[in-house]
Image: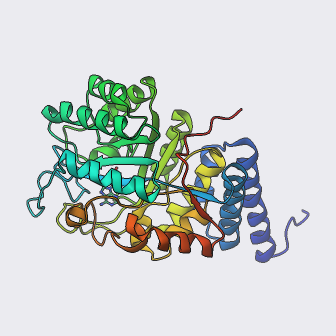
């Protein structure tokens, strides 16, 4: 029988060529089959990973140029009616000093952000008791009236359809709601019994129907997450077609039941940024604080892998330490809105700059 390859080196060479081919196909067709996604996530050849990032960056540059969008993050509250096992502000965590910003504090944060140049405000927070919905609607409508040219993004968890609708009518444009894990068994291990992936997906569908630009995503490397789970998440996102994709590594928080589990991987997070950039050239993909928390170069690594958004913190300095979703959360310097000059300088080191535009999702022509 004729020998196809002569030695191990030829075999590795062939494998690398196949993996690069997969990246090319993903770029061309914006789709791969599940075993190919798996192969890209598991491949341990550094040149392939570098090629994946490079291709994703090229695609991002084609669509967005060298501009990186900024969104001003206002951490509205750390009060939460939910009890997600990974999250530092879960309701059972008695070690948290709880706060809800006042309307005045939120408006001041936005004002400060507007003066700095931000044109998107992201109101993020724990899930407030349901009777706080009218206050949220009022708040959104106040922000909308004051800053007509700004996008309002909400990241406030699960609510009934009517509340999403009222918030939309009040002037909200976008909603971030990570699905966390599409696999019901895995989702069940990360969340209390009252929560379900079915309800999470229902919320996402409502948001879409209501005309929000929607973001979803996962924590990378959450406890018990397998590569198969991640492939399932990729396929869900492929099918759901969100405008925004939020991914960060799992980072343990010591007061939670999952506080002793291992931190997620920056490498895998960045590979996913690249895969999603190639799947969705126009998507808004933040290089997240969680990534920057586990690696001091996380923000720039994320951008070089295809991310195109950063979300500096506009919250009042006094409450920042209490919004502790996970341990060691980066809260100062370029993570903070006041550190914007530092962020500019960091981006400049990799040839990028801040794009101050609202940066709505670009629909393909
Ligand atoms: N590690 C990383 N990300 C976390 N989040 C919550 N807790 C953690 C943690 N321990 C993420 C969730 C949520 C987003 C607001 O923060 O994915 O959707």
Q: Position of residue 189 (x, y in %)?
A: 27, 49
Q: Quadrant of residue 315?
A: bottom left
Left or right of 78? Residue 38 is right
Above-or-below relation of 71 to 341: above
Q: Residue at x 36, y 58 (%)?
A: 222
Which residue is at a point 48% across and 71% down the rendered structure image?
A: 341
Q: Is residue 338 left or right of residue 30?
A: left
Viewer can see residue 287: yes
| Image mark count | 0
Residue at image coords 50%, 38%: 236
Q: Position of residue 266 (x, y in %)?
A: 48, 68
Q: Residue furthest right?
A: 2
Colouring of the image: rainbow
**Residue 263 percent coordinates (x, y):** 36, 68
Which quadrant does ligand 1 occupy? bottom left
Relative depth, front residue between 75 and 265: 75
Q: Nearer the viewer, residue 5 or 106?
A: 106
Q: In which quarter of the view is residue 326 placed?
A: bottom left
Visible residue check, residue 220: no
Above or below: residue 238 compared with residue 219? above
Residue 356: image quadrant is bottom right
- The residue furthest left is 94
Q: Where residue 311 sits: x, y (%)? A: 43, 57
Classify the position of the N terminus by image quarter: bottom right
Quadrant (top left/top right/bottom left/bottom right) for the C terminus: top right
């Amino acid at each position: 029988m004729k020998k196809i390859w002569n030695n191990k080196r030829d075999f590795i060479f062939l494998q690398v060529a196949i993996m690069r081919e997969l990246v090319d196909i993903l770029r061309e067709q914006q789709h791969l089959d599940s075993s190919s996604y798996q192969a890209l996530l598991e491949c341990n050849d550094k040149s392939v990973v570098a090629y994946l990032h490079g291709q994703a960056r090229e695609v991002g540059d084609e669509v967005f140029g060298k501009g990186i969008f900024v969104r001003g993050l206002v951490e509205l509250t750390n009060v939460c009616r939910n009890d997600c096992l990974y999250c530092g502000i879960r309701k059972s965590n008695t070690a948290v000093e709880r706060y809800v910003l006042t309307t005045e504090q939120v408006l001041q944060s936005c004002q400060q952000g507007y003066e700095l140049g931000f044109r998107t405000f992201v109101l993020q927070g724990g899930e407030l008791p349901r009777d706080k919905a009218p206050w949220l609607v009022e708040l959104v409508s106040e922000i909308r009236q004051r800053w007509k040219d700004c996008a309002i993004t909400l990241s406030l968890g699960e609510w009934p359809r009517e509340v999403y609708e009222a918030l939309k009518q009040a002037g909200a444009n976008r909603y971030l709601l990570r699905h966390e894990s599409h696999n019901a068994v895995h989702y069940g291990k990360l969340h209390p019994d009252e929560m379900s992936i079915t309800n999470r997906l229902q919320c996402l569908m409502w948001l879409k129907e209501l005309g929000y630009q929607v973001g979803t995503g996962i924590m990378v490397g959450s406890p018990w997450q397998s590569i198969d789970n991640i492939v399932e998440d990729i396929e869900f996102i492929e099918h759901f077609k969100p405008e925004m994709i939020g991914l960060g590594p799992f980072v343990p928080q010591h007061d939670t039941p999952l506080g002793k589990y291992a931190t997620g991987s920056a490498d895998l997070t960045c590979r996913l940024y690249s895969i999603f950039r190639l799947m969705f050239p126009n998507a808004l993909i933040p290089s997240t604080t969680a990534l920057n928390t586990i690696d001091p170069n996380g923000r720039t690594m994320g951008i070089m892998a295809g991310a195109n958004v950063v979300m500096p913190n506009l919250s009042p300095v006094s409450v920042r330490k209490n919004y502790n979703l996970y341990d060691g959360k980066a809260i100062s310097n370029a993570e903070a809105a006041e550190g914007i000059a530092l962020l500019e300088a960091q981006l400049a080191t990799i040839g990028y700059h801040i794009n101050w535009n609202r940066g709505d999702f670009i629909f393909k022509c």
